[in-house]
């Protein structure tokens, strides 16, 4: 799972956006993590974001 995240971060984000400073890169990675977990749909999660998938899994258990 982590390897998939870093692969997506590298190929979908960092290589397409100029990283001018470490500060810019830090902020950019933070923004990507938010996008990846809260907005980006994942086919392995039935086209849900990781957060939506986890919340739906928790509701099923409760």
Image (tube, rainbow, N blue to C red):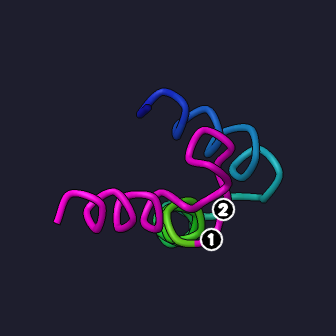
Mark number, residue 40 = 2
Image position, residue 13 (x, y; %): 72, 52
Q: Horizontally, is 20 left or right of 30 in the view?
A: right
Figure check: 37 above or below 6: below
Figure check: 47 above or below 6: below
Mark number, residue 60 = none
**Mark 2–mark 1 CB contact (< 8 Å):** yes
How packed mark 2 is, by other alpha carbons closer than 10 Å (few <14, some 14-19, many 20 or more), is: some
Point out the stretch of residues depicted in magenta: 39-62
Image position, residue 1 (x, y; %): 44, 32
Q: Horizontally, is 2 left or right of 44 in the view?
A: left
Residue drawn where x is 59% and y is 68% of the image:
35
Helix, strand or loop at label 2? It is: loop
Q: Which residue is mark 1?
A: 39
Looking at the picture, tell me which residue is in the foreground, 49 or 34: 49
Residue drawn where x is 62% and y is 71% of the image:
39
């Amino acid at each position: 799972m982590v390897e998939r995240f870093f692969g997506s971060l590298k190929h979908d984000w960092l290589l397409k956006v100029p990283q001018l400073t470490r500060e810019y890169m830090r902020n950019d990675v933070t923004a990507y993590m938010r996008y990846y977990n809260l907005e980006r749909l994942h086919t392995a999660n039935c086209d849900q974001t990781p957060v939506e998938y986890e919340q739906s899994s928790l509701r099923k258990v409760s």
